[in-house]
Amino acid sequence: MVSDSSEKTNLEAIAHRYRDVGSPSEHAVRRAAVEVVGRFIPPGGSILELGCSEGYMTFLLSHLAKRHVVVDAAGHFLAKAKTTAPAHVSFVESLFEDFEPNESFDVVVMCYILEHVAEPEQLIARARRWLKPNTGVIFAAVPNARALSRQLGRALGVMNDLHEITPAEEEHGHRRTYDRAMLDSHVRGGGADALFRGGLVVKPFGTGQLDAMVKAGIISNEHFTALNHLAIEMPDLSHTIYTVAR
């Protein structure tokens, strides 16, 4: 079992070396995720966001809810997110495992969190207690082991197994690589029932390659929108898979 102090130190180190800040392709996936989350926020609703990275998704989510609480153990990420967040967003520096809210929420958002935490099923179980009774939902999104880019990488011989943790993912603190079966298993293991499942943005190439194509003017936001439309038909090839659960 990892101690709280060592876990927080590790997360702070990861935050300082995080590479995807400002990535156009990563931002496109987060816009797609926020679009899904927005379907479950009632007027005047509330969001609990677990993890904020550099704050891009926090800024987008802040326009959906009247009450918005962000929890992250990395002070470096919180400081960045605060620079763009509206005044109504509240920030809490804490490990998810230590966080105990005194209110309930319409949506608990855990985007790109479960692949990092030591005990994903326990986090899902705790998050269920933070939902508004009968109506609140968890939106859990994770990178997809079967993304087209990873399948291409295996075909090229640059990776041996779709589930392997790449050097970049290891640097970012990933502990596992999810496919649909694993995500469904962890959701069930946390005592939750999946209401909806899907994929976000079919990913034909790696993040660095896509960002380079954006910079060169080869692809645009319209292409990412189209790739997200394709994800409805081909979630198994998407950058991200998600579950909405209760």
Image: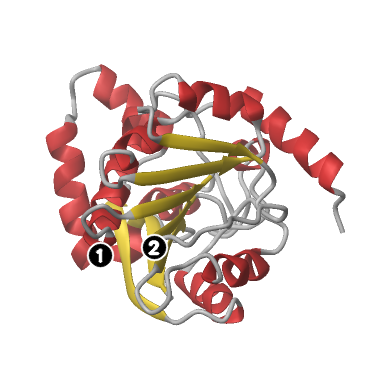
Q: Is residue 33 left or right of residue 153?
A: left
- Is residue 233 positioned above or below 134 on the image? above
Q: Which residue shows up at 56% across the image and 22% down it?
A: 79
Q: Which residue shows up at 38% across the image and 38% down it?
A: 57
| Horizontal and vertical percent position of residue 33 | 32, 50
From where the camera sits, is residue 202 visible? no
What residue is pinned by disc 2? Answer: 242
Label 1: few (<14), some or many (≥20) within 10 Å? some
Q: Which residue shows up at 38% across the image and 22% down it?
A: 84
Q: Considering depth in this image, is 20 or 91 the residue closer to the camera?
A: 91
Quadrant location of residue 171? top right
Q: Considering depth in this image, is 73 or 182 the residue closer to the camera?
A: 73
- Is residue 33 positioned above or below 103 on the image? above
Mark 2 and mark 1 in contact? Answer it, CB < 8 Å: no
- Is residue 135 positioned above or below 151 on the image? below
Q: Is residue 40 left or right of residue 191?
A: left
Q: Residue furthest front?
A: 102
Quadrant location of residue 231? bottom left
Q: Secondary structure at mark 1?
A: loop
Q: Is residue 44 left or right of residue 103?
A: left
Q: Considering depth in this image, is 178 or 132 the residue closer to the camera?
A: 132
Three-letter amino acid code at the position of disc 1:
Met
Label 2: few (<14), some or many (≥20) within 10 Å? many
Label 2 vs 1, first from the N-terminus: 1
Three-letter amino acid code at the position of disc 2:
Tyr
Q: Secondary structure at mark 2?
A: strand
Give the label on residue 234, or none.
Answer: 1
